[in-house]
Image: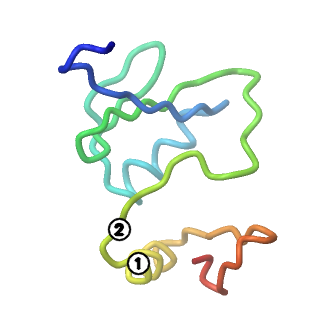
Amino acid sequence: MLPANARPIAFILTRDRAALLPFYRDVLGLPVTGEDDYGTVLDARGLELRLTTVEDHVASAHPVLSWNLPDLRATVADLTAKGVTFLIYDGFGQDEAGI
């Protein structure tokens, strides 16, 4: 059993951490709380999120991180206005906004 004070850490793997960082820091607004040889650490609303470089990483064909939002449509509209493109996946029944 994990100790009661054990906290989860999420990892986002990438070949190019410097290219990925502006999205999480500037677009999503997650503050950087540290950086070392293994990754850049961000505060994802209390969850430690590490952007970690893996030289031979192959990106997943599906989302790897999700958010519980009070107003999904407003958030999608805001992010779209900032230049974020939402992917439409076959068979998921998404609308034109990617929801």
46 lies left or right of 97: left
Q: Is residue 48 above or below residue 1?
A: below
Which residue occupies the foreground of this view, 3 or 27?
3
Q: Residue at x 70, y 21 (%)?
A: 55
What is the quadrant of the C terminus in the image?
A: bottom right
Residue furthest to the front in view is: 1
Tell me the distance, in whole angstroms, between the alpha carbons under discs 2 and 1.
13 Å
Q: Which mark identifies residue 14?
A: none
| Callout 1 secondary element | helix
Residue 8 found in image quarter: top left
Q: Residue at x 23, y 14 (%)?
A: 3
| SS of the residue under disc 2 | loop
Q: Which residue is mark 2?
A: 69
Amino acid carrying label 1: it is Asp
> Which residue is more in the foreground, 46 or 53?
46
Percent across and percent down for residue 96 are 66, 86
Q: Is residue 36 above or below residue 23?
A: above
For label 1, the residue is 78
> What amino acid type should be assigned to the residue bearing mark 2?
Leu
Residue 10 location (% of width, % of height):
44, 32
Query: Residue visible at 70% across and 52% down?
Result: 62
| Mark 2 / mark 1, whichever is N-terminal | 2
Identity of the residue drawn at 39% across and 35% down: 49
